[in-house]
Image (tube, grey):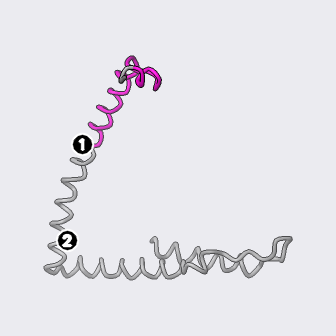
């Protein structure tokens, strides 16, 4: 679906680009043509065809990829929980430190 969307959007922009009238700033040259927007669509379509082929006839690499996916699905919630815990602890420490704030001049005087 993403590949078809890219190809149709490229065609839509091509129609708009062809129908332009020269304005005060000249003719707009779309960046999508210079970056190869249709190639992205074609790559997505080819990748989809390969994925469908692999699911019909699983190979050893397909089974390995499935196992890697299972491992990643385990580690994503673990990573999220560690990041959430770290951010909660960091935010709670911010509120405790506000009472201990001193100016730079006071810190300099205390060190001498």
Q: Please give left or right for residue 58 compared with residue 90 in the image.
A: left
Q: Quadrant of residue 90?
A: top left
Q: Which residue is mark 1?
A: 82
Placement of 97 over or under 82, stated as above or below: above
Magenta run includes residue 57: no
**Is 81 located above or below residue 30 in the figure?**
above
Q: Quadrant of the N terminus?
A: bottom left
* Residue at position x 24%, y 42% in the image: 82
Give the residue drawn at x 15%, y 72%.
Answer: 64
Residue drawn 21% across the image and 63% down it: 69
Give the residue at the far top of this rendering.
99
Left or right of 24, for residue 92: left
Boundaries of the magenta span? 82-109
Above or below, 90 against 26 in this view is above
Dot 2: element: helix
Per the image, label 1 sits on a secondary structure element best described as helix
Name the quadrant of the C terminus: top left
User: In the rendering, at what x and y percent does residue 27 appear?
Assistant: 78, 77
Q: Residue pushed farthest right?
A: 24
Nearer-the-camera pick, 105 or 84 = 105
The residue at which mark 2 appears reads as 65
Of 70 and 36, the residue lying toward us? 36
Give the number of the mark in front: 2 or 1: 1
Magenta portion: prevailing SS class: helix
Q: Residues within 10 Å of mark 1 (few under 14, many from 20)?
A: few
């Amino acid at each position: 679906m993403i590949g078809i969307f890219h190809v149709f959007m490229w065609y839509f922009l091509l129609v708009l680009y062809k129908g332009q009238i020269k304005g005060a700033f000249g003719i707009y040259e779309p960046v999508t043509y210079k970056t190869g927007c249709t190639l992205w669509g074609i790559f997505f379509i080819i990748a989809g065809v390969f994925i469908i082929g692999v699911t019909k006839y699983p190979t050893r690499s397909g089974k390995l990829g499935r196992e890697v996916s299972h491992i990643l699905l385990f580690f994503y919630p673990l990573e999220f929980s560690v990041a959430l815990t770290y951010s909660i602890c960091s935010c709670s420490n911010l509120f405790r430190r506000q009472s201990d704030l001193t100016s730079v001049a006071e810190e300099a005087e205390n060190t001498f």
